[in-house]
Image: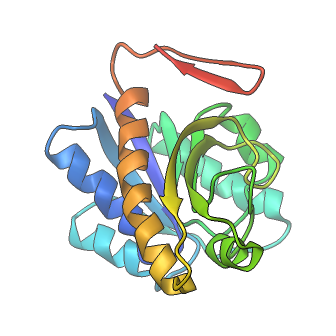
Amino acid sequence: MKNIAILLSGRGSNFIAISDAIKIGEINANISLVLSNKEMAPGLQLAKDRNYNTKFLKPFEPREEYDKLIIKELINANIDLVCLAGYTRIVSKVFVDAFPNKIINIHPSLLPAFPGLHAQRQALEYGVKVTGCTVHFVDEKLDHGPIIMQSAVSVFHNDTEEILSKRILKEEHNIYCQALKLICNKNSFISIKDRKVFIY
C-alpha cells in the first residue's frame, strides 16, 4: 500500500474524491499527510475533520528553501507519492528532484493546451469546442510533465467559466482517482519513454 500526500491550497474537492475512493477500496493507498500553503484552505479543514495528519506551512522565499521544508515533512511521513490537488504554488526543481516521477498533478485542460491559471477561461476565450482535464507527472516546467490520463469535455456556446469549470471538475475527480488506482496497484510497473507513460 502506497503512502500518499495531498498538497492543496483551496476547497479540496479532489482530495475528497481521492479520500472517498480509498475508503471504499478503489485505491490501494493511505493518505499519510495533507499539506497546505494556506492556513484557512477549506480542504485543510476537511482533512482535519476526517482525522488526517495535516500540516500548514506558510510560504516564503526563496522557493527552493520553502520546498526543502515540504520535502522534510514528506520524508518524515514516509511518502511514496505526492498528489497536487489544487496546489497553487509552482514546485521547484529541488522538489521534483527529491521525488522523481512521484509527483502528479491534475490540470483543468487538455494539456499542452491552456497551461497555468484560469485554464477554463482561456478555453472559452480561445473558442475551442472541446477542452477537458489532464493528470500528469510533474517536472520543473509549469503543467508540462508526461501525461498519465486525460478526459475530454465539450464546450457549449452558452457556457460561462463557472459552468464549464463545474463540468470539468466532475471529470477531474473521475480521472484522478482512475490514475491513482492504476499507479497504486501493488503489481503496477510504471515506465516513461519519450514523454509517453506506460503503466503495466
Is 137 left or right of 194, judged from the image as shown? left
The residue positioned farthest toward the front in the image shown: 157
Name the residue located 49 percent from the left edge and 59 percent from the top edge.
153
Total number of numbered discs in the rendering: 0
Q: Quadrant of residue 14?
A: bottom left
Quarter of the picture holding the N terminus: top left
Name the residue located 40 percent from the left edge and 73 percent from the top edge.
44
Name the residue located 43 percent from the left edge and 48 percent from the top edge.
176
| Residue 19 screen position, x and y as percent | 27, 54
| In this view, 200 is above or below 90 | above
Name the image colouring: rainbow
| Residue 166 screen position, x and y as percent | 42, 75
The residue positioned farthest toward the right in the image shown: 62
| In this view, 177 is above or below 164 | above
Q: Nearer the viewer, residue 36 or 90?
A: 90
Q: Nearer the viewer, residue 124 or 58?
A: 124
Is 126 left or right of 135, judged from the image as shown? right
| Residue 68 screen position, x and y as percent | 71, 52
| Residue 25 screen position, x and y as percent | 17, 38
| In this view, 41 is above or below 13 | below
Q: Nearer the viewer, residue 199 or 161?
A: 161
| In this view, 157 is above or below 187 | below
Q: Nearer the viewer, residue 172 or 113?
A: 113
Name the residue located 22 percent from the left edge and 54 percent from the top edge.
20
Q: Quadrant of residue 45?
A: bottom left
Is 152 left or right of 126, judged from the image as shown? left
